[in-house]
Image: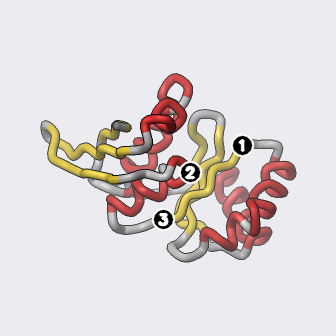
Amino acid sequence: MTELSFDTETLGYIRLFEERTGARVKDCFEAEDKLIYLVQPGEIHKAVGPGGVVVDRFKGMLKKEIQVIEYSDAEETLVRNIFFAFSPRSVEIAPKGKGRHATVTVDPAWKARAIGKAGKNLKIARAILLRHTAVDSISVA
């Protein structure tokens, strides 16, 4: 887990997002050509809007890909939320070497998409977990 600090550009993205959506942001960073927003628990519906209308409008405004994830202090819940779009069946977190490893199980039909092109989604998930938990590696089963 790292101490979060934001540069001026990121603070601007956070302020804009909060103004436009009314959702409070826990974290914001850029990874894999996407702007990742972690919103406070219970605020995901405000951030995304009905049918994703709020976040789609925001994407158009920034001309950037955006991913919004609901934050949780519980590691398993956070992992589940990161992979929400792929309907995770289970999440297991276990010691591995000196660290901790999360395994997300999804429907086999969704596995390739959950991993993403060149592991893109795994890289984003790992970045989030390194910033907010003691989990330092992740895989999709």
**Would you call the spot at circle 2 few (<14 residues within 10 Å), some (14-19), or many (20 or more)?**
few
The mark lying in front, picked from 1 and 2, is: 2
Give the CA distance from mark 3 to mark 2: 15 Å
Task: Judge from the rendering whether residue 135 lies leftward or rightward of residue 126; answer left or right.
Answer: left
Give amino acid for label 3. Answer: Tyr
The answer to whether residue 123 is visible is no
- Judging depth in this view, the residue of 136 and 79 nearest the camera is 79
Residue 29 in the figure: left or right of residue 128? right
Instruction: Give the residue furthest to the top.
Output: 118
Residue type (three-letter) at the residue carrying disc 2? Ala
* Residue position for label 2: 85
Q: Are marks 3 and 2 in contact (CB under 8 Å)?
A: no
At label 1, the amino acid type is: Glu
Say which residue appears at 58% left-offset and 49% top-offset. Answer: 29
Quarter where residue 12 is shown: bottom right
> Quick check: marks 3 and 1 in contact, CB under 8 Å?
no
Mark 1 and mark 2: span between their CA atoms?
Answer: 15 Å
Give x and y (percent) for residue 81. 47, 58
Name the residue rendered at 54%, 34% in the picture: 113
Towards the viewer: 106 or 59: 106
Q: Earlier in the sequence, mark 3 or mark 2?
A: 3
Instruction: Name the residue tied to disc 3.
Output: 71
Residue 65: give its label: 1
Q: Disc 1 or 2, which lies upstream in sequence?
A: 1
The reply to whether callout 1 and callout 2 are in contact (CB within 8 Å) is no
Near-viewer residue (64 or 14): 64
Query: Residue 56 falls in which quadrant of the image?
Result: bottom right
